[in-house]
Image: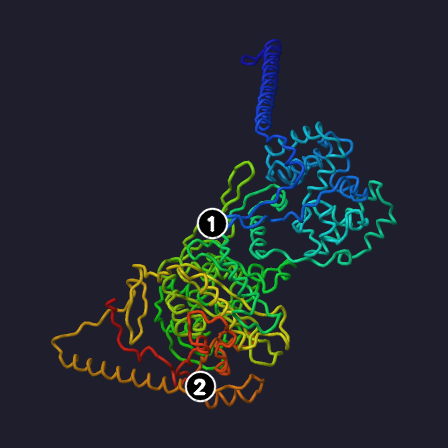
Amino acid sequence: MEEGYPSRRQYQKKRQQGKKILKKLAIHTVMAFFICGVLLMGVLAFAAVAYVRDAPQLNPELLNSPQSSTIYDMNSKKVTDIAGEEYRKVVPLDQIPKKVQNAFLSVEDARFWNHPGIDVKRVAGAAVANVKEGFGAEGGSTITQQLVKMSFLSSEKTIERKVQEAYLALKVENKYTKKEILEKYLNKVYLGEKTYGVATAAEVYFGKSVEDLNISEAALLAGLPQRPSGYNPYNHPDLAENRRNIVLSLMEEHGYISEKEKKEAQSIPVEKLLKKRENKTFYNSFTDRVIEELKEKGIDEKELFTQGLKIYTTLDPKAQSITEKVLKTNEYIEFPDDQFKAGVVLLDTKTGEIRAIGGSRHSEEVQRGFNYATQLKRQPGSTAKPVMAYGPAIEKLKWSTYEQIKDEPIELNGKVFKNWNNRFHGNVSMRKAMQWSYNIPAIKAMMEVGTEEAKQFAGKLGIPLKEVFPSYAIGGFGDGISPLQLAGAYSAFGNDGVFNEPHTVRKIVYPSGKEKSLQPKPVQAMSDYTAYMITDMLKTVVEEGTGQMAHIPGLPLAGKTGTNELPDTIRGSGVTDAWFAGYTTRYTAAVWTGYDEITQESYVRTKDSHNAKLIFKHIMSEVSKGIETPDFTMPPSVEKVTIGNQVELFVKGTAPKRKQLNIDKPKKVEDKEENKQQEVEETEKKQDEVQEEEKEPEQEKEKVPNPNEEKQENETPDTNKPENPGGEKPAQDNQQPGEDDNQQNDDQQDTGNNDKGNPGNNPPGNKDTPPPGDTGGTDGSGEKKEEPATQSPPPRKDDG
């Protein structure tokens, strides 16, 4: 054999040594896995023992009756139980028909009579689903376990809760008979509409005793526990009917009914089974929002109605009562008819805590599941301009309130944008554009800053948008927003740019004493200079512009009007929607008014379009009584500059510098003095013209489509007619939504007659008189341009 190669004996010896090493390694590996398994089992066993040790005691009182959660107000005083005693009827098992019992057993626990409290087969099936889809994807709880969870535990999908649930279920099965357990469950289970147990649900949904229920009704009830709100037959009849049919199929599968009985029961429409819904409580709008908000934050609805939670809310009972009274009576405002809808949200400007919700003018409307304050989605009209146009422009470009924007006809992407009366005003300041709600400057401002910036700005204020187009600058949103969203956005302007998500719940406390805070964290959504400069312009809107009807003497207030134009198919003077959003340093409110459907008979007439401002005014007046409301404080990042007779605001460092006088050239000084005197004379002359124009505003006839009128107006503009006699008029821009709220001149006839409350002690018939007309303006020809930049006196820094 050649040198360097091992012999056969040496090779075999090495091979045997290698086998021994592999064998030892395999043994050690197995031992390691075994030890790890034992340790893991030990850890799990230790954890299980710890979970069992911490499990609550088996309290018979808690097991027997449901515990309704209690709502507390902003001062932690009890307001109401989520469900009253009338929703807790208890009956013995022998009074519950077999068909009702079997319906629940078929869908909730088919092997109830055979398992010891835990169904191993069902647990195994749920375990497979949880491995595939994640923990908590599917439950394996028996009726006994559900009873335990409703009585003692939270609905959190955790290992601890499942271990305690199984342990307590075994104890319950050991202490009570199967019939006793089923009886407790059928009297305790939550079935929606604030009802506990089958006896109560039979009366609430069908208006009959549980003993008189038919198979179809029994199956409908049995399908509710899984998703009481989602399968609510009043709100979702189609889903409820599908769920009922599934239960009927399971009843047939388990031999409780025949195929013929199944088909007969499935053939009955759900709507024919139900009785007329009853009204809810006085605080219905607010409590409904509380429940929805808790569900959004992961609190199970069944937990709310069965586990005795203490829910500490932001409700101000006084403010809620005032809101309800303003909306649901004619004591303050003369509403046009019962079909006229309204929704309002009042919240704390500094914290975002909701103080009151006016969800409808009629309680039964919210009872049907719709809340006009929180669930409505309508285009916001010109109330969007601070959010979509001017706010982003100040934030990103640091525009001043005097920024000059040319108001002129524009066309973008084939759409023609114009103002309500086809008139244009040349160069106007951003303040004036906001004051009289001109459309073109808002669109130009958003286009200048960029649609992406506008989108991000709105998103930080709780208004998420998938896409943004030029029409969004004037409120032409694709999907619309709710008063809740609008109030949240506006509150940030009054809170130095800090956004707090509007919320109704501060915290919840479980029966065990465990607390869970639900207050959102504040977010700096914009710079303080943006918030203050927008606020200052919106104060001008209320004091001297389209929002004067919402003005409250002695109360520092900022706000904005908004309306949407009527479709071309409707003849008449009015709008589809009327909004008002405003705020003080204490409160913020947003109001929407309108109709469910716009027809020739049901649309917001011009005189009724002021109701949104009046609703705001009366609620804000009442809640502000007896408390000090300080004015908005100008931050150091803003400076004042007097331009002509108007104080304008600039971001610090961007204001124009004051021109220095050259003492070596006295002639220039004299010229400057002469120019100054000439400018003063021109200003006085212009003011005289304005006063003359405002004396006799012409009454305008009701709008009737006439193709010749617009042509005549363009050819011979009436520059003596005031442009804004009382409110905003929606844009007439080729079906461009969300326009300008300047009303037609027939608004002059409306002197606030809808307003019956007269807050602020204004003279009757005059307190809500529409504001005087805007001055100047052209018909688009450009012959007369109002306030061009070249006509303004030289700016100087304000001493104050």
Would residue 556 be seen by someone viewing this image from the given angle?
Answer: yes
Of residue 379 and residue 400, the one placed in the foreground of this image is 379
- Horizontal side of 15 relative to 720 (left or right) equals right
Of residue 695 and residue 561, the one placed in the foreground of this image is 695
Q: Position of residue 200 (x, y in %)?
A: 71, 48
Question: What's the residue at 41%, 83% (across, down)?
Answer: 777
First in sequence, mark 1 or 2: give its number.
1
| Among the 4 quarters of the image, the one containing residue 586 | bottom left
- Horizontal side of 681 relative to 237 (left or right) equals left
Q: Position of residue 301 (x, y in %)?
A: 62, 46
Q: Amino acid at mark 1?
A: Asn
Report which residue position mark 2 lands on.
697
Where 233 falls versus 164 (above or below)?
below
Report which residue position mark 1 lands on.
75
Secondary structure under the numbered disc 2 in the rendered image: loop
Question: What's the residue at 57%, 43% (across, down)?
Answer: 309
Q: CA distance from mark 1 to mark 2?
A: 51 Å
Would residue 464 be seen by someone viewing this image from the given angle?
Answer: no
Secondary structure under the numbered disc 1 in the rendered image: loop
Where 10 falls versus 497 (above or below)?
above
Q: Which mark is residue 125?
A: none
| Among the 4 quarters of the image, the one containing residue 399 | bottom left
Would you call the spot at circle 2 few (<14 residues within 10 Å), some (14-19), or many (20 or more)?
some
Q: Position of residue 1 (x, y in %)?
A: 59, 11
**Circle 1/circle 2 CB separation < 8 Å:** no
Q: Position of residue 615 (x, y in %)?
A: 50, 67
